[in-house]
Image: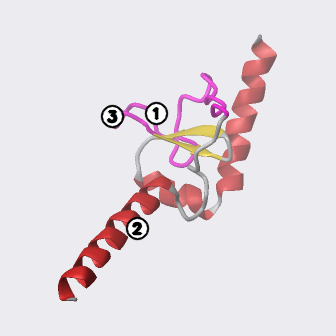
Amino acid sequence: MKRRMLITGMVLAIAMVFVLTKVQADGTNSPSSTQPKPIPDLLTNCPVSGDALGEMGKPYVFVYKGQEVKLCCPSCKDDFDKNPDKYMKMIRAADKKTDEKK
């Protein structure tokens, strides 16, 4: 009986780890059949800190509501999550500038 409970517990723990790695609580990185819209080339600075992207190593990249977002480092993600609309406006403004240049 103890062995069966142990095996059941292990299976549930593995399943939970699998589920948690696939889905984030905010749903911003949920799998999608469409590719995320790439970040505009004109956005060379982190919208959160203002630091140059790549200055501190490889930029932190994630997808927010179908839009690829690049930040200078993972710690800027916390600030982004507090007010994502503010930073998405900056990204969209840079995207409009890219479209106007074409």
Quadrant in the rendering for residue 102: top right
- In this rendering, is residue 74 above or below 2? above
Q: Secondary structure at mark 1?
A: loop
Other residues around mark 1 within 10 Å, as few (<14) / some (14–19) / many (≥20) = some
Q: Residue 86 location, x and y as percent?
A: 70, 53
Determine which residue is flagged by label 3. 57
Does the magenta portion include 81?
A: no
Magenta-colored segment: predominant secondary structure? loop
Residue at 61%, 30% in the rendered image: 39
Quadrant holding the N terminus: bottom left
Other residues around mark 2 within 10 Å, as few (<14) / some (14–19) / many (≥20) = few
Work out which residue is located at the far right of the displayed protein and give it.
100
Work out which residue is located at the far front of the displayed protein and give it.
1
Q: Residue 2 location, x and y as percent?
A: 19, 88
First in residue order: circle 3 vs circle 2: 2
Label 3 amino acid? Gly
Determine which residue is flagged by label 1. 52
- In this view, the residue in front, 17 or 88, is 17
Q: Secondary structure at mark 2?
A: helix
Q: Secondary structure at mark 3?
A: loop
Is residue 61 rendered to the left or right of residue 81? left
Is residue 66 rendered to the left or right of residue 18? right
First in residue order: circle 1 vs circle 3: 1
- In this rendering, is residue 96 above or below 71? above
Q: Nearer the viewer, mark 3 or mark 2?
A: 2
Q: Residue 61 location, x and y as percent?
A: 48, 39
Do the numbered discs 2 and 1 sit on residues whose CB atoms are within 8 Å?
Answer: no
Determine which residue is flagged by label 2. 16
- In this view, the residue in front, 88 or 14, is 14
Q: Which residues are magenta?
A: 34-60
Residue at 42%, 56% in the rendered image: 21
Q: Residue 67 location, x and y as percent?
A: 65, 39
